Amino acid sequence: MLNKECISAQKSEVLWYVMRLAYSNELKFKNYLDSLSIESFIPMHYEFKVVKRVKQRILVPVIHNLIFVHTSKNILDAVKCSTDLPVRYYTQKINNKHYPIIVPDIQMQNFIAIAGSYDEDLKYLSEEAISLVKGDRVRIIEGIFAGVEGVFVKLKGTRARRVVVEIAGIAAVATTSIHPSMVEKI
């Protein structure tokens, strides 16, 4: 068990680390971090679930197995060793070496400001959805058009994004407005 005296003795730069936990243990790990007074954040949203035959609105993680932790690497390494929860760093590969992903403070503050509001109209986007540009070939993965493939476009004079399916040289049809989170690049 890691104690608070051990944590206060560890000194290094405090950063936001992206951590991964197996088996949806992110809330247990957050509780453990809270008990050690270590700041952390899990993006959450409300879902309706049936519990004992009663439909309830409950707060659940948006992305299971993900938690952001604000502390030094030394402390985080000590915390990882002190728990039996399966926790590890999200990493990025640079020159054939893996390094922990670090989120800049201002970027994390902005993310928490939006994601921490639990607004029901928030749309969480994958990295692929963010990078979509006009002309990308996409597949619709949600809604009534799921499985349809076409070209991602923004029609002139509108802000709406659509997927266009074309029969070469004959005709083309555009879907109704499609949110980027509902398509994947192919």
Image (cartoon, rainbow, N blue to C red):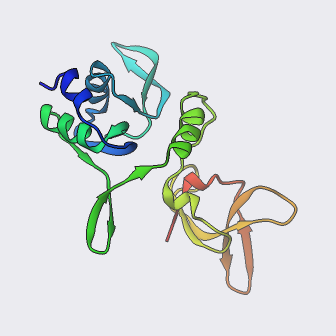
Q: Nearer the viewer, residue 91 or 59?
A: 91
Q: Quadrant of the N terminus?
A: top left
Residue 149 located left or right of residue 43: right
Q: Position of residue 69 (x, y in %)?
A: 36, 37
Where on the picture, by quarter, is residue 66? Answer: top left
Rendered residue at 18%/37% (across/down):
78
Q: Position of residue 23 (x, y in %)?
A: 22, 38
For residue 138, above or below residue 87: below
For residue 47, above or below residue 81: above
Q: Nearer the viewer, residue 175 or 91?
A: 91
Rendered residue at 30%/33% (across/down):
26
Where on the picture, by quarter, is residue 74? Answer: top left
Where on the picture, by quarter, is residue 72? Answer: top left
Q: Nearer the viewer, residue 70 or 61?
A: 70
Number of disc labels: 0
Q: Residue furthest right?
A: 157
Q: Nearer the viewer, residue 159 or 55?
A: 159
Residue 124 located left or right of residue 4: right
Rendered residue at 60%/37% (across/down):
122
Q: Position of residue 32 (x, y in %)?
A: 25, 24
Q: Position of residue 123 (x, y in %)?
A: 58, 42
Residue 105 located left or right of residue 27: right
Rendered residue at 33%/22% (across/down):
37
